Amino acid sequence: MSDAPVVHIDVESFLNDPYPALAQMRAESPICTVPELGATLLTKRDDIHACEKNVAVFSSHQPGGLMNVLMGHNMMRKDGDDHRKERFVYYPAISPNKVKMYWAEEFARLAHEVLDSLGSSNAIDLVPAYATALSGEALKVMTGLTNITFEQMDAWSQAMIDGIANYGGDPEVEAICRAATKAIDDAIDERLTQLDGSTDDPSLMVVMLSSGMTLEQVRANIKLTISGGQNEPRDAIAGAVWALLTHPDQLDRLRSGEVSWLQAFEEYCRWISPIGMSPRRIAADFEYRSVMAGAAPVRFESEDRVFLMFGSANRDEAHFPNGDRFDITRDTSAALAFGAGPHFCAGAAASRSLVGEVALPKLCERFPDLRLEGTEVPRFVGWAFRGLVNLPVALA
């Protein structure tokens, strides 16, 4: 383990609201070892930005990591040429141009279908009824797994997320994750029997298979896509709606056209980062000094585990004054909501389109009187992945 200062946390409090502890770490020990998490945490934006690009030391290749063990060896857990080769195949299917020319229209079509299913005035929980449904339906067509339901997509995603964040080694969590990954393999196998051999199919499954990728690689990267491509849009949709309903003055600025919906999405992902952490393995002994003035150098040893705390970076006072405040007019260009360096999220353009340009504006256009409803308090949970558990609203 590194020789960084030791900081203890209350795990349950950190799960419910990590931001006070992260703020204290940034101020006092921006690089610190947290025994309760079994890792050294980097909490300041500029440290994370610099170290994430140094893949020779802060490696994504983690042979014994939970993602590799439970989901297969995907491109996110590879570095160098191995990563670039798979990303080169994967990326064109969801590039900004592909999103603009093809997927954006699909997202709009699916949004209308989900909105039509909501009715007009009944109180609903927006998390399953809209955020989960739309993100799941979008991910079905993008992956090519059109033979499953959005409920299955969401359940499998959550099971994998819980599994790869299971640093306490809960056997029940692991078993649920393994059952989900087996179900995904079965769904892929079933879908393969239905494909007609056309190379015009823009889905990730067909694009990867057509490239000559092995089935093992396809399976692993489809699981990767599901693990991040379902929960991040789901949590961003629900969370951003909650943020806007609790900040009606900012919602008014969106409706007037003064501020773009995409800007609201970017600010939400800075403020409450749906993906709050990315793990790294130290590949070689290394000494690093934090950007914080007066910080002592930290010595990392080979095979140390490091957590890059994106959720903390995105509230770093050095870049985001009053970072605990939601403000859709804020400059978010320094945010790391989608990471940085060679592992910058390949699905960023799709997420921005689905949430910022489709899900949020279409919901508020369809239901201009949308409001929070009932006595049940919306509840956030998570620090590695963070999102709303519930969002009771009235549509009219």
Image (spheres, rainbow, N blue to C red):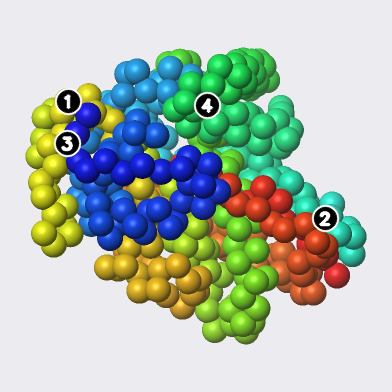
Dot 3: element: loop
Q: Quadrant of residue 150?
A: top right
Marks 3/1: CA distance?
12 Å
Q: Residue at x 51, y 63 (%)?
A: 268
Three-letter amino acid code at the position of disc 4: Gly
Write down the residue under mark 1: 302
Could you tell me which quadrant the N terminus lies in? top left
Q: Nearer the viewer, mark 1 or mark 2?
A: 1
Left or right: where 140 falls relative to 222: right
| Mark before the other along the chain sequence, 4 or 3 | 3
User: Is residue 249 found left or right of 46 in the rendered image?
Assistant: right
| Nearer to me, 217 or 332 | 332
Image quadrant in which the C terminus is located: bottom right
- Say if residue 248 shows up in the picture: yes
The picture places residue 63, in percent across and down from the top left corner, at: 32, 18
Would you name the residue on which mark 2 appears? 124
Q: Which residue is mark 3?
A: 3
Closest to the camera, between mark 2 and mark 3, is 3
Per the image, label 4 sits on a secondary structure element best described as helix
> In 3D space, how far apart are the residues under numbered discs 2 and 3 (Cα atoms)?
50 Å
Q: Amino acid at mark 2?
A: Ile
Q: Is the C-beta separation of discs 3 and 1 under 8 Å?
A: no
Residue annotated with mark 4: 163
